[in-house]
Amino acid sequence: MGIINATPESRYGGGYTRLCEQILSRVEQMVSEGAAIIDVGGESTRPGAMSVALQEELDRVVPILESIKNRFPVFLSVDTLKPEVMRAALAVGVNIINDVNA
C-alpha cells in the first residue's frame, strides 16, 4: 500500500496543479515498486492536528482520487473520518474506506 497525504503538512506544495503532478508522479513510482493499493488522505490524523473543514477535505481528496482512478490500475483507499467524504470517494469508485475513527 502506498500512502498519499494531501495535506499542508505533507511535502506536496506549490498549488493544486503542481500538487497533482507531484502526487501522480509519486503514485506512478509506488505502483512501479509494487503498490497495489493507494491510500489518499486529506486531513492529518496525527495527535494534535487541526481538523479540516468538510469542503476543504473534499477539494483535497476527490480530484486526486479521480486522477489516480483514471490513470492507474490500483485499488483505491480513502483515509477520512467524515461520512460525506466517504460517500464522495465511493462515488469516485474507491475500494476501501480507511476510517481510523470507527
Image (spheres, rainbow, N blue to C red):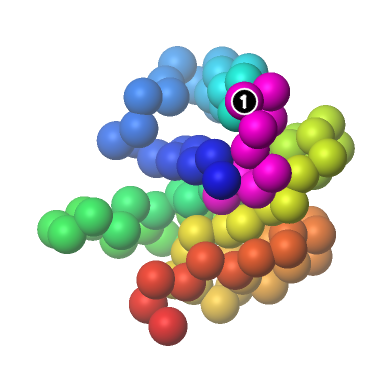
- Foreground residue among 25 and 74: 74
Which region shows up in magenta?
31-39
Q: Residue at point 57% right, 23% down? A: 26
Which residue ends up furthest to the bottom in the rendered image?
102
Q: Is residue 24 visible?
A: no
Residue 78 coordinates in the image, percent (x, y): 58, 58
Which residue ends up furthest to the left in the rendered image?
48
Please give the count of numbered marks on the rendered protein.
Answer: 1
Q: Residue at point 65% right, 65% down? A: 96
The answer to whether residue 46 is left or right of residue 96 is left
Mark 1 burial class by Cα count in 10 Å: few <14, some 14-19, many 20+: few
Q: What is the quadrant of residue 25 in the picture? A: top right
The question of residue 36 being in magenta is answered with yes
- Foreground residue among 68 and 87: 68
Question: Where 36 falls versus 11 (above or below)?
Answer: below
Question: Where 50 falls versus 96 (above or below)?
Answer: above
Which residue ends up furthest to the front in the rendered image?
34
Q: Secondary structure at mark 1?
A: loop
